[in-house]
Amino acid sequence: MTSPSAQKLDGKALAQSTQSQLKQRVEELKLKQGRAPGLAVIIVGDDPASAVYVRNKEKACEKIGITSFGQHFPSNTTQAELEAKIATLNDDSRVDGILVQLPLPDHLDAIQALYKIAPEKDVDGLHPSNLGRLVRGEKGLRSCTPAGVMRLLASYQLSIASKKALVIGRSILVGKPLALMLLEANATVTTAHGKTPPEQLRELCQQADILCVAVGKPNLITADMVKPEAVVIDVGMNRIEDESGKKRLVGDVDFPQVAEVASYLTPVPGGVGPMTVTMLLENTVTSFEQRFL
Ligand SMILES: NC(=O)C1=CN([C@@H]2O[C@H](COP(=O)(O)OP(=O)(O)OC[C@H]3O[C@@H](n4cnc5c(N)ncnc54)[C@H](OP(=O)(O)O)[C@@H]3O)[C@@H](O)[C@H]2O)C=CC1
Ligand SMILES: Nc1nc(=O)c2c([nH]1)NC[C@@H]1CN(c3ccc(C(=O)N[C@@H](CCC(=O)O)C(=O)O)cc3)C=[N+]21
Ligand SMILES: [Mg+2]
């Protein structure tokens, strides 16, 4: 007996091939400009999810030849100190990309800090100018996670136009820009969030041809909620302790169950995460090229 089983959307493999192409662009830039692209990541405090991301990003930068300017600040850093650091990086000609790790400690205002990043160095695509460009359908630096999801869908040649897409989550980092990108690709897009009643969420899920989940709750999506043959994108990253007390990373989707219903499904790890890192590198290289070539 064969049971239906979803094809894995292999973000890790696509990330590797995309990064080897980026490496060549970096080599050419070094020859033409006499320096490597530079990426500065500002971290304030110690958020564990951010720590994973920063580690992976630094490894990837090293691999493809981007210079990292890591900046780790204590959790009692003030808004003024944070904004002064951003200003310094804006003026630093070795730095092509600036990213402020989110979430920031509660006493800091992320939205205000993001205004201070020079839009042409805003490799996370979170400055109002880049978010506005996305809304208007213009070119610009775009948020890495949604861009990575779109790239993954494209590489498997999954059609988006005229499909019903549901995005769960509405953060400016993931949910909102992802909904806008799916809309740009002509999906019929719905967004659900924390104020969507659970029964309504279930019904919307069951209708979705493309289901994107960016919430941060393990097993939020179970097999009974998924339309047969749907494409399921699991953005969630949750560090949990399993029955044997071992720490592991899971998404928001009950993977083994949903794999029996969906046609394509991203694993966690190995799905969206590596694509996020790759889009960050790509945005950094693009930012360098756009300012100097
Ligand atoms: N794979 C990757 O590369 C990345 C993964 N992540 C992960 O993705 C997840 C989301 O990240 P992020 O967007 O930054 O998180 P936020 O916490 O900023 O946003 C979570 C969203 O989920 C909504 N939500 C909460 N509970 C429910 C529920 N029961 N039903 C429906 N919606 C709900 C919230 O609604 P409301 O607005 O009403 O509060 C909010 O819009 C996290 O697990 C994060 O770690 C994040 C970035 C990159
Ligand atoms: N301004 C800002 N931009 C972000 O994009 C951002 C952020 N802040 N804050 C934290 C979240 C989280 N995030 C991750 C991205 C990739 C992995 C990743 O590489 N995951 C791998 C491996 C994880 C592992 O095995 O430990 C995977 O899923 O396969 C993880 C987490 C980006 N974020
Ligand atoms: Mg993943």
Image (cartoon, rainbow, N blue to C red):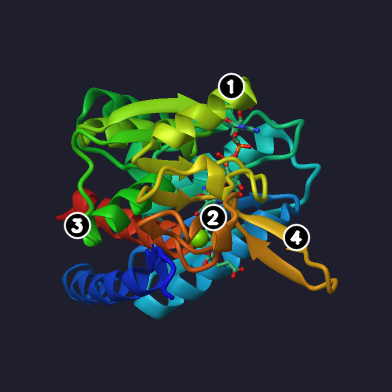
CB at disc 4 and ligand 1 closer than 8 Å: no
Which residue is the site of mark 3? 157
Quadrant for ligand 1 reads top right
Labels 1, 4: front one: 1
The three-letter code of the residue at mark 4 reads Ile
Q: Position of residue 164 (x, y in %)?
A: 31, 33
| Cα gap from disc 1 to disc 3, whole angstroms | 31 Å
Using the numbered discs, state the Cα–Cα distance from disc 1 to disc 4 in whole angstroms. Answer: 25 Å
| Near-viewer residue (98 or 265) | 265
Q: Does the beta carbon at disc 1 come under 8 Å from ligand 1?
A: yes
Kind of element beneath mark 1 = loop
Secondary structure found at label 2: strand
Which kind of residue does numbered mark 3 sit on?
Gln
Residue at which label 2 appears: 41
Marks 2 and 4 sit apart, C-alpha to C-alpha, by 26 Å
- Between the C-alphas of marks 1 and 2, the distance is 34 Å
Q: Which sits earlier in the primary sequence, circle 2 or circle 4?
A: 2
**Front-most of residues 135 and 243:** 243
222 to the left or right of 15:
right
Mark 3 or mark 4: whose residue is earlier in sequence = 3
Question: Is label 4 in a helix, a strand or a loop?
Answer: strand
Q: Nearer the viewer, mark 2 or mark 3?
A: 3
Circle nearer the N terminus (1, 4): 1
Q: Which residue is mark 4?
A: 240
Residue lying farthest to the front in this orientation: 1
Amino acid type of disc 2? Answer: Val
Residue named by callout 1 = 196
**Number of numbered discs:** 4
Q: Amino acid at mark 1?
A: Thr
